[in-house]
Amino acid sequence: MKNKVVAIQGDNFKKLNYNNDTTVFLALEAQKQGSKIFYYEPKNIFIKNNQIYADGNFIKLFYKKKFYKLLNKKTINLEKSNYILIRQDPPFNMNYITTTYFLDRLKTVKIINNPTSIRNISEKLYSHEFKKYMPPTIFTSRILDVKNFIKKNKFTIIKPIHGHSGNNIKLLKGNINKKFLSKYLIKHGYIMCQKFLPGIIYGDKRVFIINGKTVGSISRVPKKGSFLSNLSKGAKPINIKLTNKEMKISKLIGKDLKKDKIFFAGIDFIDEQLNGDINVTSPTGLKTFYDLSKINLASTFWKELKA
């Protein structure tokens, strides 16, 4: 990794939480191994003279409150970088998709995750390949489908197919509010409906997959009165181990993800059932896992990538 250039395509780095952000954790490990870190925002990638460029900054990172130092502002030919990490958060919209088309044109750079793959793999729809390991689930934009699903399954979770971070997830408790459902579908289009698993109050399990391998996991316990296990929604992380069933399913999914050129992913279980979120755009949780276990999966990430 010495003297390699690691380019990171992400959100405004000044707003990152250095205490638990996976992007910072990965970048610090690369920096420790001798790499130079170039950071740019998706809006600053462009094509000129048939080359892919980005405006950004070479930065130095630290684990303290002032966690970054701007070294110099540059426009670089991304083909000259050694690695590119796609680390901006969803939403998975046309701007996101456009950057993947730009990055597809690069020939010699290792890009994590592969831009074609993250464009083709819907984080929620991809889970349909493993529906036998999931609770009852449908994907639809039709209000009649949602109403029939609620009648059959009573307590139901609904969420936008391209949502993220626990945003706009609703728990419906068997009462069908036609006005609410209509507005929700108009706003979000296709949604995922899933039978509510009450075991979520004890936490879900986030599994980390790197290069097809199951390398670690944590549990995230919702705060009192909530059913959302996202850390950004106040859930508490704890160290756990996977059951044999969860490990078997994780290995199956990891094998398929590697075949589909997804290097780094996160999958979630509730009550040993896959909950349908297979995070491939900007997986998180590695720093939290390190804080709980002292196992450095950022080191594993770069070791596997170099191999």
Image: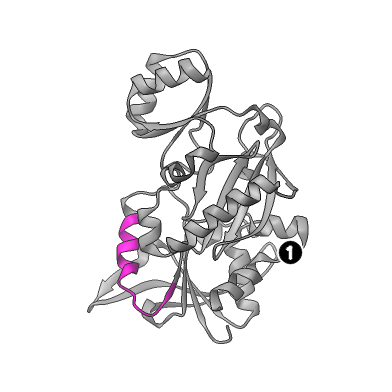
Residue at image location 77% in from the left, 62% down from the top: 294
Residue at image location 45% in from the left, 43% down from the top: 124
Q: In which quarter of the image is residue 196?
A: top right
Question: 288 or 278, which is in the foreground?
Answer: 278
Question: 117 or 135, which is in the foreground?
Answer: 135
285 left or right of 73 in image: right
Would you say residue 19 is visible in this rendering?
no
Asked which secondary structure carries label 1, the reply is: loop
Q: Is residue 29 above or below residue 212?
A: below
Q: In this view, does 137 lie above or below 46?
A: above
Callout count: 1
- Is residue 100 rendered magenta in the image? yes
Residue on which the image places disc 1: 295
Q: In which quarter of the image is the C terminus?
A: bottom right
| Farthest residue, direction bottom | 3
Few, some or many C-alpha atoms within 10 Å of disc 1 (few <14, some 14-19, many ≥20)?
some
The range drawn in magenta is: 97-110
Q: What residue type is labelled 1?
A: Ile
Q: Is residue 179 above or below residue 301?
A: above
Q: Position of residue 90 (x, y in %)?
A: 44, 50
Residue at image location 34% in from the left, 75% down from the top: 106
Q: Position of residue 6 (x, y in %)?
A: 50, 76
Q: Position of residue 251 (x, y in %)?
A: 58, 55
Q: In which quarter of the image is residue 14?
A: bottom right
- Is residue 273 rendered magenta in the image? no
